[in-house]
Amino acid sequence: MMKKKWAALLLCLLLIFAFPGCGAKPVSSDGLVGTWKDTSGLTEYRFDTGGEMKMHALSLGSFKGTYRVDGDRITLHYRVLTKDVTDTYTMKVSGDNLYLGKSKFVRKK
């Protein structure tokens, strides 16, 4: 009985390590480049090549900053008045839709 448990465990480990490329694929910043507006029209992001970004928040104004993509996560750095802000989101790009956490943005054309 114990040999069967060890064999099953070994088989599971082999399957996990045999297919490391399966699962979620990293999002490249290439598909992110462009201008995205949230569905409520309150926030807009412009992502440029090289990690530069600009955020426009209807109630606060515009803020320049940088972004970094790491797999399915994006980290935004920008300054609001005198405060440095860092936001990290789970990110997904699907055609002309961008999801930052639970917020949906549509690519502006």
Image (tube, grey):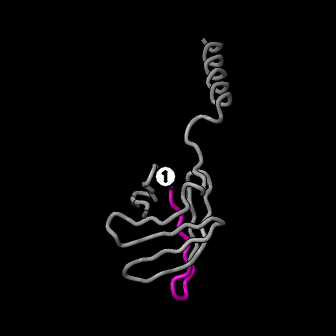
Q: Which residues are magenta?
A: 79-93
Q: From the top left corner, tell me how far across and down residue 91 is, in percent.
A: 50, 55
13 or 35: which is nearer to us? 35
Q: Residue furthest left?
A: 40
Residue that mark 1 sits on: 92
103 versus 7 height, above or below? below
Q: Height in image: 2 above or below 104? A: above
Going 46% across and 49% down the picture, which residue do you hit? 94
Residue depicted at x 45% and y 56%: 98
Quarter of the image for residue 30 reads bottom right
Task: Please give the count of numbered marks on the rendered protein.
Answer: 1
Indicate whether residue 50 is drawn in magenta: no
Residue found at the very far top of the displayed protein: 1
Q: Position of residue 3 (x, y in %)?
A: 65, 13
Q: Residue at x 39, y 58 (%)?
A: 104
Depth order, front residue of 13/1: 13
- When the figure is inspected, residue 22 is found, relative to residue 66, above or below; the finding is above
Residue 74: % across, % down: 56, 60
Quarter location, residue 67 = bottom right
From the image, give the main secondary structure of the stretch colored magenta: strand
| The C terminus - image quarter | bottom left
In the figure, residue 42 lies in which quadrant? bottom left
Task: Label 1: state its secondary structure.
Answer: strand
Judge left or right: residue 27 versus residue 101: right
Alpha-carbon neighbours of circle 1 within 10 Å: few (<14), some, or many (≥20)?
Answer: some
Identity of the residue furthest to the front in this view: 109
Q: Residue at x 31, y 67 (%)?
A: 40
Amino acid type indicated by mark 1 = Lys
The quarter of the picture where the N terminus appears is top right
Percent coordinates x, y for residue 108 in the rendering = 42, 64
